[in-house]
Image (cartoon, rainbow, N blue to C red):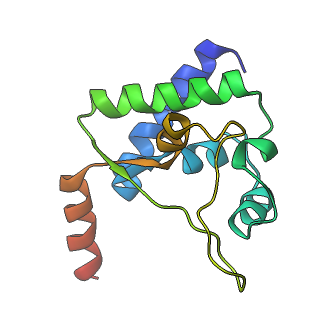
Amino acid sequence: MSNKELEKEIKRLVHSNRYLKGYVCAVDVLLQLNFLSESDYESWQLGKVDCLEEVCSVDLVKLSLVNKLIRRYAVELDLESSWTAYNQMGKRLSRRLRFSQSGSKAIEEQYATHYVDKKRMAELKENSSNI
């Protein structure tokens, strides 16, 4: 996928996730782009993989572009950024999961940031309570 095609697809996914879920996050977008498989995501959640980037099917340059574009479109939509903790799941001691090979705080924060549309979240909550 070219960078131009990727840009269009990420814009579409940001808008779609904002509408369907009320928020946008990098992990969802990576799964939807098929840059990350469900089984690799689950392995990462269980702590079987050192970092998320290790199991993504694209290089670090492409992953950096994905995060940059998510942030750009989230800002355009005036979504509120919210850092979210990703902790290991399973029976072992819970620990914070790592996203990046480098472990850089800035990169970790990019992956862990969810972009929230509070108005849309309220609408979704209201709709679910009316069912």
| Residue toward you, 34 or 43 | 43
Answer above or below: position of 23 versus 44.
Answer: above
Answer above or below: position of 104 versus 130.
Answer: above
| Residue toward you, 79 or 9 | 79
Tell me where residue 8 appears, x and y as whole percent.
52, 22
Res 100 quadrant in image: top right
Q: Residue at x 23, y 35 (%)?
A: 78
Tell me where residue 6 appears, x and y as whole percent.
61, 23
Q: Residue at x 64, y 47 (%)?
A: 99
Residue 49 placement, left or right of 110: right
Residue 35 placement, left or right of 88: right
Give the quarter of the figure containing the N terminus.
Answer: top right
Give the quarter of the figure containing the C terminus.
Answer: bottom left
Answer above or below: position of 128 versus 1.
Answer: below
Q: Residue furthest bottom?
A: 91
| Residue toward you, 102 or 124 | 102
| Residue toward you, 4 or 74 | 74
